[in-house]
């Protein structure tokens, strides 16, 4: 059963910093999104802001207001999901205090940040007092549990499709889900392998957090996730979500997926109207061939 949740996206809903919230507003099999927090869009429908059409998820100004709204409608939220993905993966001082306030209100915290809130003394103390849990999705497994590339990808008989991008935040994950859902609707059994926190938050059964792994184990973890999906589900197609960008100066990614997943098909996502890389206006986009 999906966990009733509030998505925290303070000051980020209409920017690429809010891309985790965007994914959850589109859909989630892991969480039932009841409300979104962003004071810049108070009173709007989150679906209208992100998707262009309403989906019944209201935007409220603060976490206490969102908690009160959920209680009044008879579906109290149990969890606050951080829907922000800022550069460096850290909350601002104000955002940190607001999320800490959610712990004091009795909400579990699910975070995809690089800043591990479960290791923050203030968060640990307040979580213990409130009896809530803090889950840092991006915290990597212990080294002894990580996989080195072994070549077992050759055992995978499913068609492997990689969705890569010429820039970050161009819709790679959304496209990957659309391909998976479209194939399944046509009777072609397909499975998604997520490579970032948002795919896991949306309910991907097979996921790694590529950008939090030690480099030596990145290809092995990709290979193991694809191989495990094949072993357990026997799909006809496996779609691997891309991460970052092939050429972005701050978020390079994709070559590891090519090397480890050995895809037969590649979908290249591109934003033709962009003139510079996401977040770096002084770095012009490289032209397509």
Image (cartoon, rainbow, N blue to C red):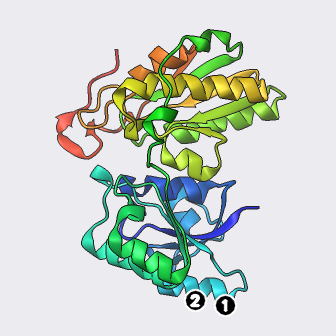
Quadrant that contains the N terminus: bottom right
Percent x, y for residue 200? Answer: 58, 47
User: How far across and down, in percent of the image, does residue 5 sit?
Assistant: 61, 70
Visible in this render: residue 40?
no
Q: CA distance from mark 2 to mark 1?
A: 6 Å
The reply to whether dot 2 and dot 1 touch (C-beta < 8 Å) is: yes
On residue 72, the disc is: 1
Q: Nearer the viewer, residue 39 or 89?
A: 89
Residue found 73% across the figure and 24% down from its top: 231
The location of residue 31, given as percent across then percent down, is 65, 61
Which residue corresponds to mark 2? 68
In this view of the protein, which residue sits in the foreground, 146 or 240? 146
Local packing at callout 2 (Cα closer than 10 Å; few below 14, some 14-19, many 20+) is: few
The picture places residue 131, in percent across and down from the top left corner, at 56, 78
How many residues crowd mark 1 within 10 Å: few (<14), some (14–19), many (20+)? few
Q: Secondary structure at mark 2?
A: helix
Quarter of the view holding residue 56:
bottom right
For the point 71% across and 80% down, which residue is it?
75
């Amino acid at each position: 059963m999906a966990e009733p949740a509030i998505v925290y996206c303070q000051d980020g809903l209409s920017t690429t910093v809010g891309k985790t919230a965007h994914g959850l507003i589109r859909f989630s099999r892991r969480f039932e999104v009841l409300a979104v927090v962003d004071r810049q869009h108070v009173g709007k429908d989150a679906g209208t802001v992100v998707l262009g059409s309403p989906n019944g998820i209201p935007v409220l100004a603060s976490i206490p207001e969102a908690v009160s709204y959920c209680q009044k409608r008879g579906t109290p939220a149990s969890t606050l999901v951080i829907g922000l993905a800022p550069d460096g993966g850290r909350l601002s001082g104000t955002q940190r205090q607001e999320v800490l306030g959610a712990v004091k209100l009795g909400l579990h915290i699910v975070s995809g940040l690089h800043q591990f809130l479960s290791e923050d003394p203030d968060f640990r103390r307040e979580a213990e007092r409130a009896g809530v849990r803090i889950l840092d999705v991006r915290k990597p497994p212990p080294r002894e549990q990580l996989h080195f590339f072994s070549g077992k990808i050759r055992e995978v008989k499913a068609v492997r499709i990689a969705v890569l991008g010429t820039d970050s935040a161009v819709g790679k994950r959304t496209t990957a889900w659309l391909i998976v859902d479209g194939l399944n609707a046509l009777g072609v059994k397909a499975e998604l392998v997520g490579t970032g926190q948002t795919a896991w938050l949306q309910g991907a059964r097979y996921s790694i957090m590529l950008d939090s792994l030690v480099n030596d184990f990145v290809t092995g973890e990709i290979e193991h996730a694809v191989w495990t999906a094949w072993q357990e589900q026997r799909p006809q197609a496996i779609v691997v979500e891309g991460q970052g960008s092939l050429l972005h100066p701050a978020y390079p990614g994709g070559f590891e997926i090519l090397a480890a997943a050995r895809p037969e098909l590649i979908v290249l996502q591109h934003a033709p109207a962009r003139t510079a890389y996401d977040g770096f206006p002084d770095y012009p986009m490289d032209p397509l061939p």
